[in-house]
């Protein structure tokens, strides 16, 4: 394998690419007088985007079995899912910093747009923690069943986005591909058993 090919398949490089959108967010967050509220949307949006990408890769690979780009991403799906969790965690840190105190956080916990966000994060925790080879081997078939909770996290994230931003527009742009590909999968019985 040539040096260029090794660079293209490098795990550290892929992780660096996944982390790249966080760089300006962290720079803003660490600047004096940082406005954490302005960081909520980009961090949450990157989490949602990466979650959707992780979930569409299997049906997309079934729809486009010879597409090298889709196969390349499918081999890195766990990293994409863990990055989605990372941005969700960052989003939560920014939210807590923007709120400033526990009383204010608890006061709005009952709002649909808030509890769905917290619950989506909690669902993503075991998915991120178990996204490694050792856990896959230990859990065997149970690992795949556990990872299907990512769909629950996606639905909660969608509801969170719609209710926090009072509208469907941007949320549907991100989640429509996932919905359409899942409908395609349901409509084709031979694809139903795939993860």
Image: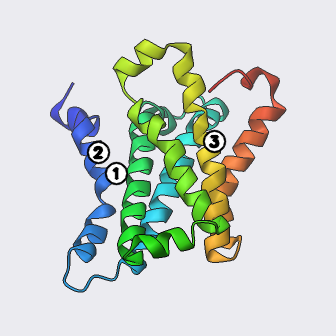
Q: Could you say where residue 145 lies in the image, as x and y percent from the top left?
A: 60, 24
> Is label 2 or label 3 in front?
3
Image: 44 above or below 70: below
Question: Which residue is at the front of the view, 6 or 58?
Answer: 58
CA gap between label 2 and label 1 equals 5 Å
State the mark number for residue 70: none
> Is label 3 or label 1 in front?
3
Q: Secondary structure at mark 3?
A: helix
In terms of sequence position, does the residue under pointer 2 or pointer 3 come before the other?
Answer: 2
Question: Which residue is at the front of the view, 45 or 69?
Answer: 45
Q: Residue placed at 61% from the left, 72% from the top?
A: 164
Residue 123 placement: quadrant: top right
On the image, numbered disc 1 is attached to which residue? Answer: 18
Residue 36 placement: quadrant: bottom left
On the image, numbered disc 3 is attached to which residue? Answer: 151
Q: Could you say where residue 80 lies in the image, as x and y percent from the top left?
A: 42, 43
Image: 41 above or below 150: below
On the image, numbered disc 2 is attached to which residue? Answer: 15
CB of mark 3 within 8 Å of CB of mark 1?
A: no
């Amino acid at each position: 394998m040539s040096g260029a090919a090794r660079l293209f398949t490098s795990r550290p490089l892929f992780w660096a690419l996944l982390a790249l959108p966080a760089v300006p967010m962290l720079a803003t967050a660490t600047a004096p007088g940082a406005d954490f509220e302005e960081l909520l949307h980009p961090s949450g949006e990157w989490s949602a985007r990466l979650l959707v990408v992780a979930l569409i890769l299997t049906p997309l690979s079934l729809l486009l079995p010879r597409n090298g780009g889709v196969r390349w991403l499918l081999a890195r799906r766990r990293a994409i899912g863990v990055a989605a969790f990372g941005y969700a965690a960052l989003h939560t840190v920014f939210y807590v910093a923007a709120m400033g105190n526990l009383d204010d956080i608890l006061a709005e916990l009952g709002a649909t747009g808030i509890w769905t966000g917290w619950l989506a994060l909690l669902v993503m925790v075991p998915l991120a923690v178990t996204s490694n080879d050792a856990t896959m081997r230990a859990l065997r078939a149970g690992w795949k069943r556990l990872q299907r909770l990512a769909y629950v996290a996606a639905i909660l994230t969608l509801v969170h986005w719609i209710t926090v931003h009072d509208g469907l527009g941007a949320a549907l742009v991100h989640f429509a591909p996932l919905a359409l590909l899942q409908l395609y999968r349901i409509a084709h019985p031979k694809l139903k058993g795939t993860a």
